[in-house]
Image: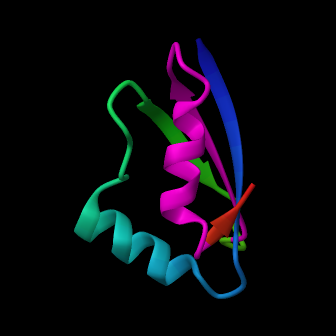
Amino acid sequence: MLYMVIEYFNGGAAVDIYRRARDRTRQLPPGLEYVDSWVDLDYFRCFQLMQTSDRALFDIWIAEWSDLAHE
């Protein structure tokens, strides 16, 4: 199933988010696939298309980024 995830960056965290993504990749658990994404002009909100057959995998992925972003 295809999901649209709307992620909100914590204040001032955009640089750290991009740095972590560069250094550690997207930290997706097996079975959760990144499709595409785009960010608003203020680097406050990120829209991501993700695909999985197991909705519970989002909880694992969200936990990896909870210090820098929230849903």
The residue at the point 52 percent across, 13 percent down is 53
Q: As displayed, is residue 10 above or below residue 27?
A: below
Give the quarter of the image for residue 58.
top right
Q: Position of residue 46 (x, y in %)?
A: 65, 55
Residue 68 position by quadrant: bottom right
What's the image's color scheme?
rainbow
Q: What residue lies at 29% left-to-right and 56% top-to-bottom?
A: 25
**Quarter occupied by the N terminus:** top right
Q: Is residue 14 above or below residue 3?
A: below
In the rendered picture of this protein, how many numbered marks are placed on residues? 0
Is 66 magenta? The answer is yes
Judged left or right of residue 60, residue 4 is right
Residue 31: within the magenta?
Answer: no
Give 31 or 37, whichever is nearer the viewer.
31
Question: x%, y% of residue 10?
Answer: 70, 77
Q: Nearer the viewer, residue 58 or 51?
A: 58
Residue 27 on image: x %, y %: 36, 52
Q: In which quarter of the image is the C terminus?
A: bottom right
- Give the residue drawn at x 37%, y 39%: 29
Task: Tell whether 7 sits left or right of 60.
Answer: right
The residue furthest left is 23
Q: Position of residue 39 (x, y in %)?
A: 62, 57
Task: Looking at this view, name the residue that lies furthest to the bottom.
Answer: 12
Is residue 69 depicted above or below 31 in this figure?
A: below
- Magenta residues span 44-68
Q: In the image, is residue 66 above or below residue 15? A: above
